[in-house]
Amino acid sequence: MVMGNSHLFMGRSNKLAVIASHLQESRLLFPGKQWQCGDLTGESAVLESNVSGSKDGKYELLSAANDLIADEIKDLMTKTGEIKGQQTDTVLAGSLAKALCYINRISKETKAGEEVKSRILVIKAAEDSALQYMNFMNVIFAAQKQNILIDACVLDTDSGLLQQACDITGGLYLKIPQVNSLLQYLLWVFLPDPDQRSQLNLPPPVHVDYRAACFCHRNLIEIGYVCSVCLSSKNQVYFL
């Protein structure tokens, strides 16, 4: 929430969308359904619901956004069904696709002559899912075609898929050495826009794991077989 508030404070025209990627669904936390369709920042809706102003001195938009995000997260966790086994992967590809759709909506609703510079920040604490490899790569190349940067802030184990996403789209990939310093890295590394990053001393690029997932078992492989017809990669050869 501090990262989102800081982004909104950086410029009057800045907009924010927060999407939760969970085990069973991806949900748009902010802006919520109660915001007006024509108001992508939700500011007019906040002013309508807080006519008397904020009593504690907070900016109404930030205060309402924080409350809405917290309520949506609680509702998402409450409605989560029983988790079987030790499943920790999320529907990340679907969440990224939803983010691209939201960016496309904003781009179409902007005035003529205005340019929208969008970027996506993924804060990841779950494991990669090789089953989502094809969908994930489609989302990455769609973002590259629209000149949308994908940044990744990884809290747990390294993510080969996000390394590829950041390298292809020109974003930054960073595995946090200490979770206690998460806010510091978010504000230092990911808050500045791409034009400002060239003037900062940022962490060096990481080695990208470009292993592909086989089509037969969805496992990441280093050496495989490529079909000459459909160009799919496999880790086994089947003779008929």
Image (cartoon, rainbow, N blue to C red):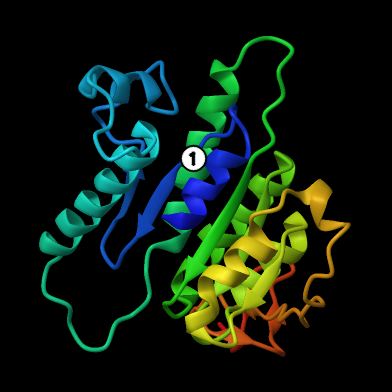
Place of residue 87 in the rendered image (x, y in percent of width and height, measured from the top left): 29, 82
Quarter holding the N terminus is bottom left
Q: Is residue 15 left or right of residue 226?
A: left
Q: Residue at x 50, y 66 (%)?
A: 123
Res 34 seen here: yes
Place of residue 233 in the rendered image (x, y in percent of width and height, measured from the top left): 65, 75
Q: Which kind of residue does numbered mark 1 sit on?
A: Leu
Compared to residue 68, the image places residue 203 above or below, namely below
Quarter holding the C terminus is bottom right
Residue 39 or residue 160, whichever sits in front: 39
Compared to residue 107, the image places residue 24 above or below, namely below
Place of residue 31 in the rendered image (x, y in percent of width and height, measured from the top left): 36, 36
Q: Residue at x 68, y 9 (%)?
A: 112
Q: How many numbered discs sit on the rendered protein?
A: 1
Which element type, helix, strand or loop, lies under badge 1? loop
Looking at the image, the residue that sits furthest to the right is 199
Residue 193 or residue 100, whichever sits in front: 193
Q: Residue at x 88, y 57 (%)?
A: 199
Q: Residues within 10 Å of mark 1 (few under 14, many from 20)?
A: some
> Which residue is disc 1 drawn over?
16
Compared to residue 14, the image places residue 69 above or below, namely below
Q: Residue at x 56, y 31 (%)?
A: 104
Q: Is residue 85 left or right of residue 201?
A: left
Place of residue 219 in the rendered image (x, y in percent of width and height, measured from the top left): 53, 84
Res 238 seen here: no
User: Where is residue 33, by image quadrant?
Assistant: top left
